[in-house]
Image (cartoon, rainbow, N blue to C red):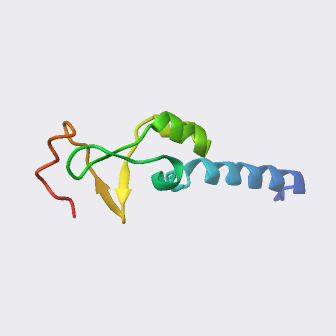
Amino acid sequence: MTTRPTPAEWAIAALFGLTTLVLLAPWPAPSVRLREACALGEAGRLGAECDLRAAAAQARAPWLLGRVRVYEDGVLLSMADGPESPRDQSRG
């Protein structure tokens, strides 16, 4: 004798599957365009600085205050030790 799942059991299984998909799916990292969110200021040679607190408030993005990676035209930019010493290595 075989028992078939009831519609309620199918609904529970579908809900569980959807929840698993939402939790495990590789969602893209959130992003914000810094040119739109903050006023970039000049910082030494080839550098720019931005007030991330003001940018996070304006963009309504509290995650912006955490670990931030900055890209320009798809290339990851790296942080210099100071405004007077840009990185010697090029990532482009």
Front residue of this view, candidates 7 and 57: 57
Residue at 62% from the left image edge and 42% from the top image edge: 60
Q: Residue 75: give x, y in percent of width and height.
A: 31, 61
Front residue of this view, candidates 12 and 39: 39
Front residue of this view, candidates 29 and 6: 29
Q: Splitting the image into 4 quarters, where does residue 11 fall?
A: bottom right
Q: Is residue 38 above or below residue 52?
A: below
Q: Is residue 1 left or right of residue 47?
A: right
Q: Which quadrant of the figure contains the N terminus?
A: bottom right
Q: Is residue 70 left or right of residue 62?
A: left
Front residue of this view, candidates 18 and 41: 41
Q: Which quadrant of the figure contains the C terminus?
A: bottom left
Q: Residue 64: give x, y in percent of width and height.
A: 49, 40
Q: How many marks?
A: 0
Residue at 23% from the left image edge and 53% from the top image edge: 46
Residue at 59% from the left image edge and 45% from the top image edge: 59
Residue at 41% from the left image edge and 48% from the top image edge: 40
Q: Is residue 78 left or right of residue 90?
A: right
Farthest residue toward the right?
Answer: 7
Q: Splitting the image into 4 quarters, where does residue 56 fall?
A: top right
Q: Is residue 74 left or right of residue 85?
A: right
